[in-house]
Amino acid sequence: MKALRIIGRSFRDAFKSVFRNFSLSMASILCATITLLVVAVSLIIAGNVEDVTKNLEKELTIVVYLERNATEEDAKFIENSIKAINNVSNVTYKSKEEWKNEMSEYNSSYGSIFDNYSENPLPDSFVVYVNDVNSLEKVTSEIKKLDKIDSAGYGKDAVTTIVSVFDFVEKITVVIVIALIFVTAFLITNTIKLTIYSRRNEIEIMRLVGSSNTAIKLPFVIEGFVIGILGSIIPIILTIYGYIIAYEKLNGHIYVELIKLISPYNFVFYISLIIMALGALIGMLGSLMAVRKYLKI
Amino acid sequence: MKFIELKNVNKTYSTGVTALADLSVEIEKGEFVFVIGHTASGKSTFIKMLYREEKPTSGSVIVGGINVAKLRNGRVYKLRRKIGVVFQDFKLLPKLTVYENVAFALECLGASSEEIRPKVMKAIEIVGLKEKVRSFPHQLSGGEQQRVCIARAIVNEPKLLICDEPTGNLDPDTSKEIMKVIDNINKDLKTTVIMATHDKEIVNRMKKRVLLIEHGILTGDYLKGSYKSHESA
Ligand SMILES: Nc1ncnc2c1ncn2[C@@H]1O[C@H](COP(=O)(O)OP(=O)(O)OP(=O)(O)O)[C@@H](O)[C@H]1O
Ligand SMILES: [Mg+2]
């Protein structure tokens, strides 16, 4: 009961001082808003890129053709060598007969072409699956180094370029977000510092009459929390409405059907939750720094 | 064990000033003790030892069974809840009324308003400020403001009331009234009172135990009524 009342008082004090030092609080809230907006946008992009990449990775494979004179033993050896390469998740063998059947089934005119040959003209092959789109090139060149390989290659060059561009953008965004988080935390620290200063008499009396250190610090930590939460309101609204509207306008995909957007329901709520938690966290981080630095108790 | 027990207490501030040297003294429950001495003799330092505003450099300070010298920072509040403190400057919160200023001491400990109300009203009655409960500090005289501080100090019913020159800012007549309030608290509530003061007239008139500190050394411990101002500075 006592603890609850102390927490209740702390919230009241926190809200009071947010409004008492309104201009400085506003600066902190705005900074948190900008930071969280950037975070929200990058989370939405990252989430979608991740989703698209995962789907593409399932489809992106390296096709390896063996030389015609390769024996069954060679094939076995090559299969094992490919499996040993980093990032290779699976290797499947497709014999020339399987190719022939598959192609004939696909189009009967192929079948008649094959009939002209006394021997199957197709090579044996492997289909190689990788864990990570970015490793396609490296794995391919590793395979090419092996003996008895006629050719090895992968398609969809444009897609892999897009994915690696996204990857690069993601890394830059992470740096920007971290920088913004620090600026915000710093601003909040300064806001709280002012509150601590303006309430120094109160703090002195609280210390004198026997408030615990936790009870003295709590209002300031909560003030940071409140600033963070207030800063997350606009980003959350924009995330929810912005994404839903964008999703509908784009019919759920970008340019081609292959690049599908994540459907908005639940996704926007997850993002909102993360944004709110992050806002609260940044706020409390800022206020804890202020309390540690300026509240000598 | 005595209520308050200081043994071989030394205090040297970080500046190198030695404010207390080898000070030992015992104080019983319910006593009224004056602490006197010239300016910079170490009176406030002595007082600060008792509520753990300062830690002794060496020696032990025991207050109500708590070894104050060994008390960790995070636990100081437990000591403070048993002690009321009054200063020369009043340290009232200007935006709060008399009632709210006194209630503040209980509110920040998490007391409920039903618990708070009777205690606050009782404390305000003891200091004789019933008519002014709704006034703000700036609407009060110096003496009245000090009464509010005393009410705030005793509202949690402490065993020990510590005063550092509570009459320092007040004229002689007002000082007399304040001393009457403090004396009544000592007599009626059996609260132990320790009070540092410059005011010889008060000390002479009230005939209580007197501790004389000179240059940080306890040079006199006069039992009830035996102190004569001419014996010292
Ligand atoms: N926080 C401090 N840091 C360094 N020196 C201090 C500190 N507080 C007090 N002193 C020094 O310790 C000595 C004793 O100071 P103290 O305040 O105890 O004296 P006092 O007897 O209360 O004086 P007064 O009657 O003027 O209030 C003085 O020389 C003072 O300068
Ligand atoms: Mg003093």
Image (tube, helix red, strand yellow):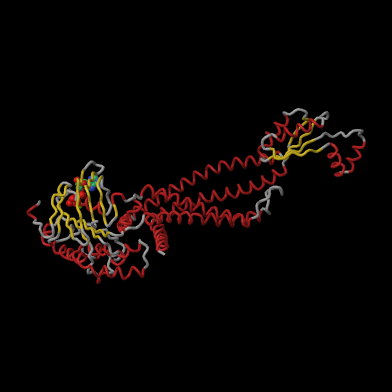
Residue B176 on image: x %, y %:
15, 64
Q: Residue at x 25, y 54 (%)?
A: B50
**From the viewer's perspective, is A43 left or right of A13?**
right
Q: Position of residue B196 (x, y in %)?
A: 18, 55
Residue A155: in sight, yes or no? no
Q: Check the picture and name the quadrant holding the N terminus of chain A.
A: bottom left
Say above or below: B206 vs A281. below
* Front residue (pair B104, B202): B202
User: Percent position (x, y) of residue B96?
Assistant: 31, 64
The location of residue B114, given as percent across then percent down, is 36, 70
* Quarter occupied by residue B139: bottom left
* Closer to us: B164 or A99: B164
Left or right, B180 with reference to B85: left
How many numbered badges does the structure rendering display?
Answer: 0
Which image quadrant is residue A162 in?
top right
- Using residue A249 as the reference point, say whether residue A28 is left or right of it: left
Nearer to the camera, A261 or A200: A200
Q: Residue at x 30, y 57 (%)?
A: B80
Residue B170 visible at all: yes
Furthest residue toward left:
B230
